[in-house]
Amino acid sequence: MAAHEPVGRRAFVVGAGTAALLGGATAGSAEAAAPLTAAAATPLAPGATLPDFHPLLKDELRFPLAWGTSPIRDFRTWRRVARAKVEEHLFAGRDDTPYEPEFGGQRIEDDGFTRELVTFSLSRYGRVRGALLTPHGSGPFPAVLLLHDHGARFDIGKEKLVRPWYDDTRLASARAWADRYFSGRFVGDDLARRGYVVLAVDALGWGDRGPVTYEEQQALASNLYHLGSSLAGLMAREDVRAAAFLAGLDRVDRRRVAALGFSMGAFRAWQTAALSDDIAAAVSACWMTGLKEVMVPGNNILRGQSSYYMLHPGLARYLDFPDVASIGAPKPMLFLDGGQDALFTSEGIRVAHEKLRAVWRSRHAGERLRLRTWPELGHVFTAPMQDDAFTWLDAVL
């Protein structure tokens, strides 16, 4: 692919070799259907894919690098050491490839803002196409990096959050997704109308960079591990790169850039806030828990597949999920959760919130952390939740 050739729908999955990484073992193939022999089987807890000794493994997780547990008492030093430990477990190196952006693709004017597609080098492995929304006016403007969810829906990625004015087929899928999770709203469009520059790009496997199938995720992750890399690590590095690209735009006030996401996007938002100095604040809707509390029989995370996008092998020997998010302290951060969310136990949310609260309070910045659980809601980012998040962003940026 030429350096500035437009990125096709499957450019990263087929053109850049992800099809080879998938190895051809898709659902229904002989390789995928082959049963595990009795001799090779690992004892499992009843009704689960956890080994029967999983309580012992949990007991061995002490998260010794967590703030307050670590012997490091200077917070700036701890943050530097903890971030380095996370980056060590990404299995994906730093990347300083020039972005070389091409602006103006499919550019149109909307109510209060301009829509355009921008193509740029998200990493040294290739170029991606992003949806970029810019408010009318002189700027520079505050900005939001939108990070899409997983949802086992791969034909749309960035389109889950920004209305795809450039593709009628994706528009139908995007509207259905917005109706299901976002009260029929496109979050990015609403943010642009409020005066924010908005950037959304596809993660590997979605939209222009896919679509993979649900069954192919595990093969993709496994083959990246074989190649000394990591699916979750690549996504983390790309999100940090996207944040730097957005912050560096002339139209953006680089001191006022936030990350916002729902579900897997929420994980990505707090993770990016922890790993990037270009992110000044973060909004995470429906992804925060303690690791031990979510690793319970019946939980979705035990199925593999989607969890590989959020799995950094070995990191749990040092840090829990809220410990990683705490690297972002004392930045303003908002965590919204649903009390009826089937993906996260109430105990897991409680444990995580307590850890987060303790860290921000230790920095005399308790007012910069907002934790809100909506008791009646499940795994959604509804209009009232969005309005709450937007009002909060207006106040902290």
Image: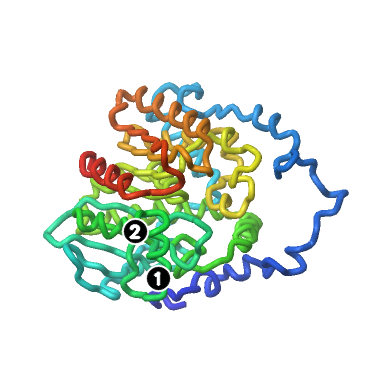
Establish if 233 lies above or below 177: above
Where 341 sits versus 217, above or below? above
The answer to which quarter of the image holds residue 187 is bottom left
162 left or right, relative to 326 = left
Gap between marks 2 and 1, in whole Å? Answer: 12 Å
Q: Find residue 327 and report its horizontal and vertical position in percent.
A: 41, 35
Coloration of the structure image: rainbow
Report helix, strand or loop for mark 1: helix
Callout 1, which amino acid?
A: Ala
Nearer the observer, 95 or 51:
51
What residue did someone put label 2 on?
184
Q: Which residue is mark 1?
A: 172
Q: Residue at x 29, y 75 (%)?
A: 106
Quarter of the figure that contains the C terminus: top left
Asked whether the viewer can see residue 323, the reply is no
Among the two numbered marks 2 and 1 on one chain, the one whose residue lies closer to the N terminus? 1
Front residue of this view, candidates 177 and 302: 177
Mark 2 Cα shell of 10 Å, populated few (<14), some (14-19), many (≥20): some
Check disc 2 and give the amino acid type.
Answer: Gly
Q: Nearer the viewer, residue 110 or 281?
A: 110
Q: Residue at x 22, y 54 (%)?
A: 196
User: For the residue labelled by badge 2, is the local secondary structure a helix, a strand or a loop?
Assistant: loop
Residue at image point 45% right, 37% down: 339
Label for residue 349?
none
Residue at 43% across, 62% down? 157
Furthest residue toward front? 376
Residue 226 occupies which quadrant of the picture?
bottom right
The total number of labels drawn is 2
Within-10-Å neighbours for mark 1: few <14, some 14–19, many 20+: few
Residue 172 appears in the rendering: yes
Residue 3: x and y in percent read: 41, 74
